[in-house]
Amino acid sequence: MRITVIGAAKSGLAAALLAKKEGHNVFMTESKSKDEFKETVSKLDEAGIEAEFGGNTQKALDDTDLIITSPGVPPTAAIIQSAEQKGLKIISELEFASQRLNNPIIAITGTNGKTTTTTLTTYILEQSGKKAVSVGNIGTPLSALVGEVSSDTIIVVEVSSFQLDRIDTFCPDVAAILNITPDHLYYHGTMEKYIEAKFKISKNQNENNLLILNFDDGATRNFASITKARVAGFSMTPLPEGIYGRDGSMIIKLSQEHKEEEIMLFKEIAIPGVHNAYNSMAAALAVRAFEIRNENIRDCLCRFSGVEHRLEKVRILDEVLYVNDSKATNVNATWFALQSYNEPIVWIAGGRGDNNDYSALDEFVGRNVKAIVAIGEEADAIFNHFCTQVRCIRQDSMEAAIDTSRIIAEPGDVVLFTPACKSFDMFVNFEHRGEVFKDIVNSLT
């Protein structure tokens, strides 16, 4: 079979190497320059995979039986549209890899909280004696696991709407949809199509599978009536069954016939913020499907320190806490971050917008943000929205933003870098952006 892989980033490379290992005739096409993929080119050459860089030509579609597309290649891309016109089958790397795995799979999606919940779920499973691994949108492509893990390893996959948009048979044993707020509309076109892509995580599930839903999120809760899977809900208020909050405690009730069981107090969860209470409930439901005891869940939630670039404590300098939340690439993620601290906040924000509506943040800005330092392409939009509410300053670099924040911040304050924007105006990705923030903060004397 001749297989064309679109995109030379991690997912594309992993899919190409797997397809070649299976004996297929593989061709890779990448629109970006070859200079950006030196390590990838070396691995492709070593595997004997033909590739083109700097543009997608007709050669990529000639005599092709299957297209594997990398996440983020939009439906409007010329190569995708040409493939569709030719009637070629197009699937995601997630779909390609999942067809080759028989492992138990937990799949987690949502606009925000995916990485934390995926990492936390894996952590609880591992600490409870299970074999488990985190893959997918979190960094390691699913294709890289094929043939590399034992069949009893539980695979916890962080899946994005991009990956789900091109699935065919992908069917996780346990799926979780954490929340849905506007994001990636440049790719999906409309909110309706974005929601539709998220629900594809349960597209092939049946009564033998479990779908975990946030019942405090309207768009997510609606899936309960259309899925074929068993549903377990999580909420901050009591539910007939599922996991929920009552009087500051996390309560689980696995069915209407079961008794309530108290897992822990929410204030005992090691990672701060109400959003992490939601993430913890989702993870708890996911691991209970694998018979993990409440005691193990509680112990792990008390110890888990979070993930890099998500409310990550960088350092305390001059009695000011510096926090890296570079993973907050949309307004909703920043909404959660701003409510995670009671201390006065000097907020560093900005980057590349995605039709951002900052009005959702007005309440928290008015409550405990003492100043905003805006950077990137959205600096003017952020300044113009908030300048009548709070002190606002525009800066043209991360270093200048941090220097300004240091001048403004007083002992007991939090300098919170939670951009509410994508990173691509100034940085390669949110990880690069977060590393730059941390490097600068750690160099302060």
Image (spheres, grey):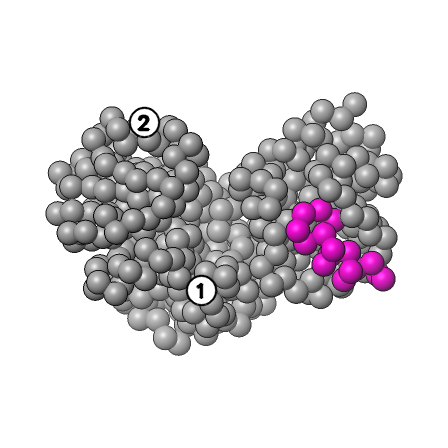
Q: Give the image location of residue 225, x and y in percent.
A: 39, 76
Query: Mark 2 touching mark 1, by CB under 8 A?
Result: no
Q: Give the image location of residue 439, x and y in percent.
A: 65, 28
Magenta residue check for 139? no
Q: Quadrant of the C terminus?
A: top right
SS of the residue at dot 1? helix
Q: Is residue 407 left or right of residue 3?
A: right
Give the answer, above or below, for where 357 lies relative to 10.
below
Give the magenta part as a residue range.
374-389
**Three-letter residue code for mark 2:** Ser
Looking at this view, is 69 or 163 the one in front?
69
User: Which label lies toward us, 2 or 1?
Assistant: 2
Name which quarter of the figure residue 301 lies in: top right
> Can the viewer see residue 143 in this picture?
no
Classify 10 Å Cα crowding around label 1: few (below 14), some (14-19), many (20 and above): many
Q: Label 1, on which residue?
A: 188
Name which quarter of the figure residue 331 lies in: bottom right
Q: Earlier in the sequence, mark 2 or mark 1?
A: 2
Q: Give the image location of residue 358, x and y in percent.
A: 69, 62
Which residue occupies the extreme bottom position in the image? Answer: 225
Looking at this view, is 323 or 249 the one in front?
323
Looking at this view, is 5 or 122 the one in front?
5
> CA–CA distance between discs 2 and 1?
33 Å
Q: Is residue 387 left or right of residue 359?
A: right
Q: Give the image location of residue 129, x and y in percent.
A: 37, 36
Magenta residue check for 376? yes
Q: Label 2, on which residue?
A: 42
**Three-letter residue code for mark 1:** His
Residue under the image location 60 percent in, 33 percent down: 435
Residue under the image location 58 percent in, 50 percent down: 422
Q: How many numbered marks, from 0 up?
A: 2
